[in-house]
Amino acid sequence: PTVEHVKITVIGCGYLGATHAACMAALGFEVLGIEIDPTRRSALERGVLPFFEPGLPELLVEQVESGRLRFSADIAEAAAFGDVHFVCVGTPQRADGHGADLTYVEAAVTSLAAHLTGPALVVGKSTVPVGTAERLQEILQSQSPAGDQVELAWNPEFLREGFAVKDTLEPDRLVFGVRSERAEATLREVYSTAIDGGCPVVVTDFPTAELVKVAANSFLATKISFINAMAELCDVTGANVVTLADAIGYDERIGRKFLNAGLGFGGGCLPKDIRAFTARAEELGVKDALRFLHEIDRINLRRRKRVIKIARKELGGRLPGKRIAILGAAFKPNSDDIRDSPALEVAHTLHELGVHVTVHDVEAIEPARTKYPDLSYADTIEEACAEADLVMHLTEWLEYRAVDPAKLGEVVAGKRMIDGRNCLDIDAYREAGWTIRSLGRP
Ligand code: UGA
């Protein structure tokens, strides 16, 4: 079928699904998004998102108005409508902390299967433990009236929050885990715009496709923890981790990206994915192979303790009763996501230690307030820093780099700054009379 004829459904319209549905419609496909929550559904139709993602609200409205994108709660309607069904539901960390919770993925595939009466391709996008696709394929073919006319493919997603639309429309690679030429041809059709634009396609089996996703995130986490381990060395030797990263980054085999030392990684993906991956390795009897990821996690969590230790030292050894301004609550800039946010966890811990904490963020104040209503929040940087004994820069929004240290110095009680992301202009702060400490820079 040609683009106009392939009909696409997207099951689960959270972060990944909403983006995927809007982008597929933008490419010219007729798309039906399946979202069970009615409030969420009507919000999606109006381009109102429960999260901050530049460009996505406008794209949703445009595609809904074009008539190519609709939303529904009805899985039977999805089965009747689509040729290709993308499964985009979440795979959160299990309550016991060990591995991924596959309830939603299994429910989506089971309920869809029951209604599929003719040929269809079901494409998994969620991040799952290796071996899941195999099982889902069995569920699909055994429970669908169409039997083996229905096929599964695994097509992991690599989008980054803050760049979701661009990453979906212009991916740097496509991975197709397929069992037939027909499945491969259908995916090539769906992604023809990117492929014609030169995007490389890796065609492979199910387990490789599943592993690519977690391997990529594990590698990224490893890069960050590697440079953070180097920052620990820099701190005790007087070396500069930023210069070190620049110097090793010039080697193309290493590369400078993801070597920004600081407070470490958070968010809904990297931390949960490395933990789920180690849990899966243990189940597969190869625990030792991924033991290092446990260390990657520990290095990462140590950063949060380290920054609090520096704060205590800067404030003369005692934290209770002190006023600290925290710049940043989101897990990274250009996002309002506070899941496993290093900045917010540090703010919360300081509060628990008896510090008067005031938090500022460019987009994440509301979600932060909902999670930690006991902390104080400020709408402006100046308000957050008013009378502060110490300012901590923990999420590197561009807005914070644009601050004039001399002006900020006028509102604080003590000109003390900790740069938890190693990107403020140390010299400018020192010239304005501040003491500034970094995580890995002298
Ligand atoms: C990550 C991956 O980058 C995506 O490719 C992947 O698709 C996604 O997870 C996913 O699995 O869905 P994301 O969670 O949006 O994307 O965030 P990143 O941009 O990767 O940043 C992750 C964390 O690492 C942030 O807390 C960031 O502050 C931190 N980080 C990043 C550093 O501490 N140093 C760096 O040099 C880079």
Image (cartoon, grey):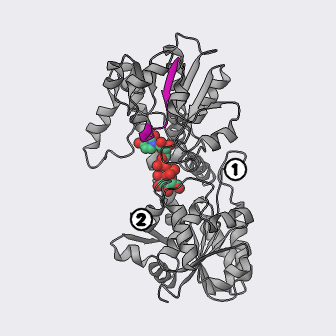
What secondary structure is found at the residue carrying circle 1? loop
**In terms of image quadrants, where is residue 197?**
bottom left
The residue lying at 65 percent from left, 51 percent from top is 99
Return the residue nearer the eye: 9 or 236: 9
**In terms of image quadrants, where is residue 57?**
bottom right
Distance, label 1 to label 2, CA atoms, is 29 Å
Q: Amino acid at mark 1?
A: Arg
- For disc 1, the marked residue is 94
The residue lying at 70 percent from left, 31 percent from top is 374
What secondary structure is found at the residue carrying circle 2? loop
Queried whether the magenta region covers residue 202, the answer comes back as no
The vertical placement of 266 against 49, above or below, is: above
- Is 222 left, or right, of 133 in this rendering? left
Return the residue nearer the eye: 21 or 406: 406
Queried whether the magenta region covers residue 392, the answer comes back as yes
Disc number placed over residue 77 in the picture, else none: none
Residue 98 location (% of width, % of height): 67, 47
Residue 367 location (% of width, % of height): 64, 44
Q: Amino acid at mark 2?
A: Pro
| The furthest residue to the top | 316
Q: Which residues are magenta?
A: 389-399
Confirm if mark 1 falls within 8 A of ligand 1. no
- For disc 2, the marked residue is 171
